[in-house]
Structure formats: structure tokens, C-alpha cells
Amino acid sequence: MRNIHAEFVKYGKNAKYWLRRCEMLLPEIAKQEIWKKKRFTSIYEYAAKLAGMNHEKVNNCLRIMKHIEDKPELLQVAREKGLGAVRPVAVIATKETAKLWAEKIEVMSKHTLETYIKDYKKEGICPGADQQQEVTIKLTPKLAKKFEAFKKRADFETLLEKFMDEVETQPKPEPVKTESPYIPVAIKKYVATKTNGICAHPDCNKPAEVFHHTKRFSLNHEHNPDQITPLCKAHHDLCHLGLIANEESQPYEWQLLAFPDTTNPKYEVDQLVQAYKTG
Ligand SMILES: [Zn+2]
Ligand SMILES: [Zn+2]
């Protein structure tokens, strides 16, 4: 019996493949004005009549191609997955980083890629740790004045750090060694309270969805409140893709990596789906 659905899927896949080939020819058609030589009134008429592409599609293709035409790694991705796949990174990618972005498109979901790009724009990749950063906080007028005065002290940073370390008042549960991947409730509660249920990544305000073991559970079979951190889906993905440097330090010290450290035993674990599921 004829399988109409299977036929449709097959033809659709082929159609998309051939349309991608058309899209990638557009810059050359524009440059050589091939549309004019073939007696069309514009490249839009040419693309619409010959390949069913609308005006917006033509503009998008030309724009993205302009950004990636000197980046072979991204051209390769575009050939395989279409221009839509390289679109999020088209503007941000440089010749030097094109390989990095091509790889990221391969391994990340769209949402995780967008989060990575956002963090990348904000903090870059591994800036110097001694670089000073500006912080903005909102305080009541009275407290603001007090803070301004306090800030002038020579030992301001040391004092502030000491204060923040000591202020942690909730009692910390003991680490639990176990074969069970389920995190004890007391530990979950302790960990979630620290970030108020928000993702622990410093630049993220999304609700936390996952309790993540910064030393993978499958490697040490332990639920340690100091090594479990609440994360949103995207930042959790970035951890398991090995793209957070010093993951075992406090999240505020985390930095984005360009490529994972494949020699880290965690990297191997993260390649296994099961390990990923148990946090
Ligand atoms: Zn997050
Ligand atoms: Zn995890």
C-alpha cells in the first residue's frame, strides 16, 4: 500500500535541501546581476518566480550570507542546516570565532545557544579574574549614604567579603553518601534557599529548574550541599556541555569557556545521557 505520509516527508526533506542550495547562491546572483541578464525586473522577482522565495526571505538570506561569506565553518553549517541555523550567531561571529560558533550550533538547542550568546556578549570568554567590575544595587537613601561612607574604607573589600561569608545563617545539612540519585529534601531546601529559587548563574534571573551536582553524582555518589547548585535549563545545559570554567567554585566565580576541557573526567560522564539525567 502507498505510504502517503512517508512520501510527503521524503519530498519535503528534498525540497528543503534544494531550497537551501538556492539560498546560498543568492549573493552571487546579486553580485553578478544574473537576474538582470535573464530579464527579470529585480532579484526578488527572480527568486520568487524561479524558487518561490518571498521578498523577506531573499533579504534575510542576503543579510546572513554577507556576515558569513568569509567564514567557511559557518558556510558549512548553512549548507547542512540552512541559513536559519546560523542566523543567531551571524552578527557576533568573527573569522577567529567562526569555528567556535559552528561547533556550538551543532551541540546546543536553540534556547541554550541563545543563553550562551547572551552570557558571551555580557562577559566575554574568560576575562581576567583581576579585572574590576562595576555593580549596581538599589538601596534606600539612608542605607545608600551609609554604604557610600563604608565604601571609602581601605579594607572595604575584605570586610564586605567577610560579612557575606558570615551572614549565611541557615544551618548546613551534612553531605550524604548514597547510591540513590535522589537529593535529600533538607539539602534541596538549603540549596534552593541560598538563591531564593532562582538560577545560581550570576547573570541569570530565571527560576531554577534543576539541582545540579557540580561534581557529578555518578562520579562520587554524594549529595553535598556545597556541590549542588540550582540552575535554569539553559545554564544546566552549559554545565553539562563543559562550558563553565571553575564549575566547582561558587557560581559567582564561574566563567564561560570557548571549548570544553575534554580531559576532565566529568566530560566523559556528561556525554552519557544517564549521568545527565541524575543531575
Ligand atoms: Zn540560568
Ligand atoms: Zn547537572
Image (cartoon, grey):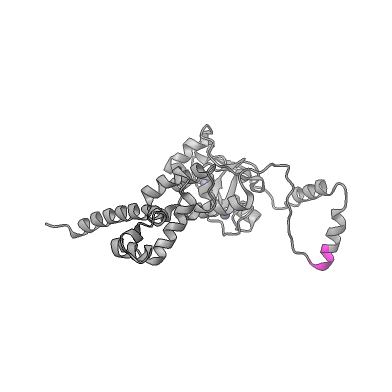
Q: In this view, does 15 lie to the left or right of 55?
A: left
Residue beneath the point at 63% across and 43% down: 126
- Looking at the image, residue 66 sits to the left or right of residue 231; the answer is left
Q: Where is residue 13 in the image (x, y as percent from the top left)?
A: 28, 54
**Magenta region, residue range:** 140-144
Position of the N terminus by quadrant: bottom left
**Residue 72 placement: quadrant:** top left
Task: Between residue 28 and residue 103, name the one nearer to us.
Answer: 28
Q: Percent x, y for residue 221?
A: 52, 38
In this view, which residue lies farthest toward the left? 1
**Residue 99 in view, yes or no:** yes
Residue 8 in which image quadrant:
bottom left
The residue located at (69%, 50%) in the rendering is 171
Examine the residues drawn in magenta and state their main secondary structure.
helix
Query: In this image, 109 relative to 143: left or right?
Result: left
Residue visible at 62% across and 47% down in the picture: 124
Question: Was residue 142 drawn as part of the magenta stretch in this picture?
Answer: yes
**Quarter of image, res 196:** bottom right
Where residue 140 sits in the image (x, y, percent)?
Answer: 79, 67
